[in-house]
Image (cartoon, rainbow, N blue to C red):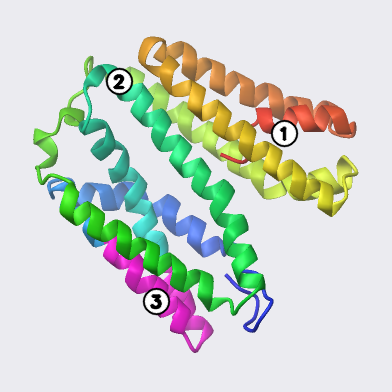
Amino acid sequence: MPARGGRGVAVVGVPPEYGVTVAIASVPLAHVVRAVPRRHVLTGLLAALVVSSLVAALAASYWLLLVARLLTALAQALFWAVMGPVAVGLFASEVRGRVVGALSVAGSLALVLGVPAGTWLGQRSDWQVPIATLAALGFISLVTIAVLLPTSRPEEEPAAYASGPDVRRFGTVLAAGALSATGAFTGYTYIVTFLGDVSGFSPSAVSVLFVVFGVACLAGVSVTGAFLDRFPWSALTAAVSTQAVGMLGLYAFGAHQVAAVYGAPSSPVGC
């Protein structure tokens, strides 16, 4: 959210209300729309994104801008809960891991390219321009989904049923994912300060390192998808272990710049 209006101001920062809204609303919203065809859910979400982005771009007060951003957060909270099953359901079960990997690449690429692009555009125009651009991209996606995605009820989709349902294993994966994501995003919150104050990198060097982190992230998620289909448990264990080693390495050796460069991409703070 921009700190102030005017030319040359970058769109920076995410208010805590946004992150909290996404975290709290994901599961309840997914439960509410569990019986609605996914094509309708996705088009509704993208319509909400377009409307909220336009309202944010035209907002004349902070509170209207905040409401628009919270509506965007609600759309995001449900989008990722629905998008995974939709994408997986379009392909055979034996390539589900690669589909999940492709989705991760797309999300990571959006972060690696979208944030710098939005900042660059905001620095060279009014801050409303990147948000209006987001509305335009959302509208293109909405039309694409509405035209091309087949309409089917969730229980009719191939992704509705696992090849070997197991409540205990699902709970294990859910807990591991929650803890891993919490660690990753906590690290992401403080990584700029850490690299500057602890590792001693200059602000310009930190910017370059974030590009390196993004490339490492893309490489990691690109490779992981192929292993998920053949060795799902080993792939999950390796990913979480790599993150733990990276985080512990930063804690123990983060004052050394070489160790920090190797350690930070290993803990997936940029993905």
Of the residues shown, which amino acid type is indicated by label 1? Ala
Towards the viewer: 182 or 58? 58
Q: Position of residue 152 (x, y in %)?
A: 9, 42
Q: Which residues are magenta?
A: 45-70
Of the residues shown, which amino acid type is indicated by label 3? Leu
Rate crowding at label 3 as few (under 14), some (14 to 19) or many (20 or more) other CA atoms within 10 Å: some
Question: Which circle's residue, 2 or 1, is located before the other in the chain?
Answer: 2
Of marks 2 and 1, the one in the foreground: 2
Q: Which residue is mark 1?
A: 264
Q: Give the residue at x 56% y 27%.
A: 220
Q: Mark 1 touching mark 3, by CB under 8 A?
A: no
Q: Quadrant of residue 40?
A: bottom left
- Marks 1/3: CA distance? 36 Å
Towards the viewer: 104 or 193? 104
Q: Which residue is mark 2?
A: 95
Asked whether, in this view, residue 116 is left or right of residue 159, the answer is: right
Q: Is residue 13 visible?
A: no
SS assignment at label 1: helix
In the rendered image, residue 163 lying in the magenta stretch gets the answer: no
Asked whether, in this view, residue 189 is left or right of residue 37, the answer is: right
Of the residues shown, which amino acid type is indicated by label 2? Val
- Main SS of the magenta part reads helix
